[in-house]
Amino acid sequence: MKNEMNKKLASYSSYLLAPPFMNFLLFLILSGKSERPVFMLGISFILGVFFPVVVFIYLRRKKRIVNDDATVKEERTLPYLIGAVFCLAAAGIFYYSNIEPLFVNLWIIYFITSLTITIINKYWKISAHAMGAAIPLGVLLYLGNSYYLLFLIFLIIVMWARLTLRVHTVAQVFWGAVAGSIIPIIILRIMS
């Protein structure tokens, strides 16, 4: 009974703390730094949440992805690459719309991490959920924003959920968290 309850809680946590939602929450938290927050959040929602979720649902319905956890690593490549294209499109829109450089850089971070996870995924399965929760953590740590604690909690929940659901090993969630938190810090240091 307890095990079943844990799996349900882990499943709900995985859905609610999925990478697109963590991405949008980061943009929402930082929206006060934008002179055009509604435009910035609108584009971030469309290209960071709506389109990726629609693509994932489409691929699930076409049986290109076998389950909601995308447990077969070979099936992850296409959604990762499509996600990278959305990130690059958002960076371009922000750049040419004169949105603050921080937000352009965030989309570059998401583009680079999408490519990174695609390359890693070719050889080894890594937790995209852990990476998705760790990216905002790394960004907010770099910026000195106290909301990093919220994402640290989210990261711990995500790691627990992915392990409880048995869709990842400890190493896969650990390295997802490490890559997700370090890559943004390196990119932000280079870009600043």
Image (tube, rainbow, N blue to C red):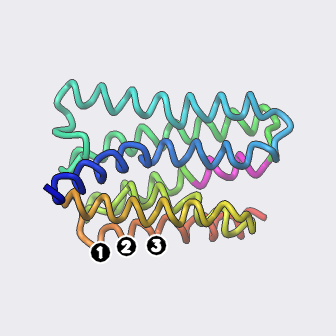
Picture disc at residue 51: none
Q: Can residue 108 be found in the magenta stretch?
A: yes
Return the mark for residue 174: 2
Residue pointed to by mark 3: 178
Give the residue type at disc 2: Phe
Front one among 166 and 120: 166
Relative placement, left or right, of 184 versus 79 is: right
Looking at the rendered structure, which numbered label has been put on residue 171? 1
Residue name at image x 16 percent, y 30 percent: 63
Does 9 sit left or right of 130 as displayed?
left
Whether residue 190 is visible, yes or no, is: no
Q: Is residue 90 above or below residue 4?
A: above
**Neighbour class for label 2 at 10 Å: few (<14), some, many (≥20)?**
some
Q: Label 3, secondary structure: give it.
A: helix
Badge 2 vs badge 3, beta-carbon distance below 8 Å: yes
Q: CA distance from mark 2 to mark 3?
A: 6 Å
Q: Quadrant of the C terminus?
A: bottom right
What residue is shown at x 53% (from left), y 37% (from top)? 48
For the N terminus, give its image quadrant.
bottom left
Where residue 154 appears, x then y in whole percent?
48, 59
Query: Are dots 1 and 3 in contact, CB under 8 Å?
Result: no
Residue 116 placement (x, y as % from top left): 44, 59
Q: Is residue 72 left or right of residue 26?
A: left
Q: What's the amino acid at mark 3?
A: Val
The residues tagged by marks 1 and 2 sit, at their Cα atoms, a distance apart of 5 Å
In the figure, residue 52 lies in which quadrant? top left
Q: Can residue 131 be seen from the camera position used here?
A: yes
Discs 1, 2 touching: Cβ within 8 Å: yes
Give neighbour class at mark 3: few <14, some 14-19, many 20+ (Cα, 10 Å).
some
Residue at far front of view: 1
Q: Quadrant of residue 6?
A: bottom left
In the image, the segment drawn in magenta is 101-109
